[in-house]
Image (cartoon, rainbow, N blue to C red):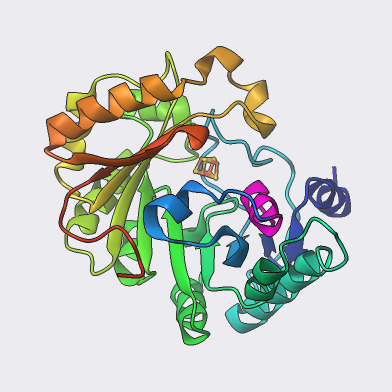
Amino acid sequence: MDSIEAKKTLAKQGYHLVGSGAVKPCLWLNRSMRGGDQCYKHHFYGISSHRCVQMTPTLRCNHLCLHCWRPIDSVLPKEEPMEPAALLDGILHEQQRILSGYGGAKTTDKSRLKEALEPKHVAISLMGEPTIYPYLQELIDLISKRGMTSFLVSNGTNPEVLESIRPTQLYISLNAPDEGMYRRISQPSGSFWPKIQESLSILKNHNCRSVVRMTVARGLNMERPKDYARLLGSAEPDFVEVKAYMHLGRSRTRLDREAMPDHAEVLSFARALGNAMGYDLSMDVPLSRVALLSSGRICKSLDS
Ligand code: SF4
């Protein structure tokens, strides 16, 4: 498949490509625009799904995680990193185009549409590893200058970049309690385990709100909570999100449906991890099969 074919395939999957990056409306934006429920980030942190822009500055990743639902194993378009102002302009323009499709629909909640046209939040987490993009802090600065908050999700393989960036909330994904399991699950393109450990220790004294996100799959990595707790002891994140693997997208070719834990299993694992870390189980959202552990150091809502 060449670059043109790769672009066509991504477009069919709902990705709006902008230079080296992309924006894609998530299913929660769609539900929220119809007056329905919003994603767990709304319940946890007060983010409005219809005012959230889900984007990435790069499609590339140095992992190939078994649970990844994104088309990360496809041939990807060959694009040079786009300059951050042009990238953000392009992403926001595409978001407006996406929203314009709701204008004529009878099912649209008109007050939410009006709000959506002024986004308040950018989730840098759509696809790929954002620290590969060379102008990441400039992009975060521009997001902030335009009055929006930013969540950035990284796989932790570039500690030097993580140390220097200042999103509103910084996430590191952690999928395993040791290197052997990490290599099996994340299929990294290099020897990154020491880098991930370094990133976790950087989180401890980072100025941003900090979160470790764990995607847990039955029979794969939802075990040994005490070993995870030991590792997380070096990071002392403000929050830990424990989220079920969902049998969606490309991950269906790598994992069975049985790997998807139910909410009770997620809660049980999150409780065991919370006990081992001394964190409280502060909230959970059954529909998304996700639980939030809190250190109790800061308020979870961004509005407070
Ligand atoms: S690090 Fe994230 S984007 Fe990369 S393969 Fe893993 S889940 Fe997918």
Quadrant in which the N terminus appears? top right
Residue 203 seen: yes
Q: Quadrant of the rendered structure where residue 80 is?
A: bottom right
Residue 4: percent from left, percent from top: 87, 54
Dominant SS of magenta comes to helix
Specify the segment rendered in magenta: 25-34
Q: In the image, 96: left or right of 68?
A: right
User: Is residue 28 found inside the magenta-colored segment of the image?
Assistant: yes
Residue 103 drawn above or below residue 1: below
Q: In the image, 132: left or right of 237?
A: right
Residue 229 drawn above or below residue 260: below
Residue 75: percent from left, percent from top: 74, 44
- Residue for point 51% across, 17% down: 259
Residue 264 drawn above or below residue 179: above
Residue 173: percent from left, percent from top: 39, 44
Q: In the image, 111: left or right of 48?
A: right
Residue 101: percent from left, percent from top: 84, 64
- Give the total of numbered labels: 0
Of residues 240 and 162, the one nearer the viewer is 240
Q: Quadrant of the rendered structure where residue 274 is?
A: top left
User: Is residue 92 found inside the magenta-colored segment of the image?
Assistant: no
- Residue for point 64% across, 42% down: 72
Quadrant in which the C terminus appears? bottom left
Of residues 1 and 266, the one nearer the viewer is 266
